[in-house]
Image (tube, rainbow, N blue to C red):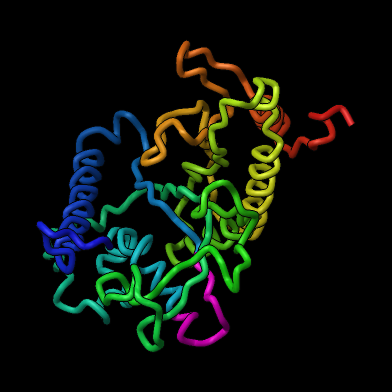
Amino acid sequence: MIKCKEGDSENEPFIAAHNIILSHAAAVDIYRAKYQAEQRGKIGIVLQHEWYEPISNSTADKLAAERARSFTFNWFLDPIIFGNYPTEMENILGSTLPKFSSIDKVKLSKGLDFIGINYYTAYYVQDCLYSSCKPGIGMSRTEGSYQKSGYKNGIPIGEPTSFSWLNIYPEGIEKAVTYVKDRYNNTPMFITENGYGEQDNPNLTMAKQLSDFRRIKCMADYIEALSKAVRKGADVRGYLAWSLLDNFEWIYGYTIRYGLHHVDYATQKRTPRLSATWYKQLIAKHKRTSLSTMTGQ
């Protein structure tokens, strides 16, 4: 967490997260009571799920990897499914964590119908609770006392991209989904975001901008890894590619392109990339379409 001069970074993030969890419980309670029977819909929650690998085989780093999951993904799901915060958080934070009242727990017990997972990348995790770490983000107890990096001894955890935070690690989506299956009673899952972003380069010809073979390979590898988890019993109900169109991306704005369709921001013209055709074929045939078919080889 980044220190805020005007706020209390040691306590306020946990209050904010607590209120988000209670808001989810309230929304589920209202939906189940007033709308679900008639609409026959489902309600769930979507969370970012980075996969964390211990940077070494030491017990401390293995515990740190689990702690990283507890201070991110599990932070929100454990209360919804189990009624309490993760043990790893409670052991470190103690009274810093807000408490759920008996009424809160009744609402939380109504849970969810599915878990949405946004997966893009993975990190190595180093313990900072029992080991010494270089000064930086992650060292404080309120951050879980671990540090993460996409690199180990200068080698990236997966295929590097134009962005330092985004290394392509397909094994991570299989591990993340399997982890959710095992921890949360195989609650139905959707991959609500997964994709490949490229640095915008206006100097490229349109033909090159539309020939996004790296995106096709990345998505194919991710879907294949996901299918391994499904074959092992993970209840994954769907996969949603990010994204249909190039769009305004958080801190990167229009400088990163995730779209299966290219967008000319001056004219708003949409043009399908090769990945759009590949993905369309994949959906239609329910099987992986080879790169050789796309390239005519």
Answer whether residue 230 is visible to the viewer in this image: no
Which residues make up the magenta segment?
A: 52-63
Q: Is residue 242 magenta?
A: no
Find residue 150 and report its horizontal and vertical position in percent.
Answer: 53, 63
Residue located at (65% from left, 55% from top): 159
Find residue 148 and report its horizontal and vertical position in percent.
Answer: 45, 68
Find residue 278 and report its horizontal and vertical position in percent.
Answer: 70, 30
Q: Quadrant of the N terminus?
A: bottom left
Find residue 203 and report its horizontal and vertical position in percent.
Answer: 60, 26
Residue 187 sits in quarter: bottom left
Residue 214 sits in quarter: top right
Residue located at (52% from left, 12% from top): 269
Q: Is residue 269 above or below residue 2?
A: above
Residue located at (49% from left, 80% from top): 62
Q: Quadrant of the C terminus?
A: top right
Residue extending furthest right?
Answer: 297
Answer whether residue 194 is visible to the viewer in this image: yes
Residue located at (59% from left, 17% from top): 271
- Total labels: the figure holds 0
Q: Is residue 58 magenta?
A: yes
Direction from residue 57 to residue 136 in the image, left or right:
left
Q: Who is closer to the viewer here, 191 or 185?
A: 191
Direction from residue 60 to residue 31 in the image, left or right:
left
Q: Is residue 190 above or below residue 133?
A: above
Q: Is residue 168 above or below residue 284?
A: below
Q: Who is closer to the viewer here, 80 or 103?
A: 80
Direction from residue 36 to residue 190 in the image, left or right:
right
Q: Is residue 44 above or below residue 68?
A: above
Q: Who is closer to the viewer here, 9 or 235?
A: 9
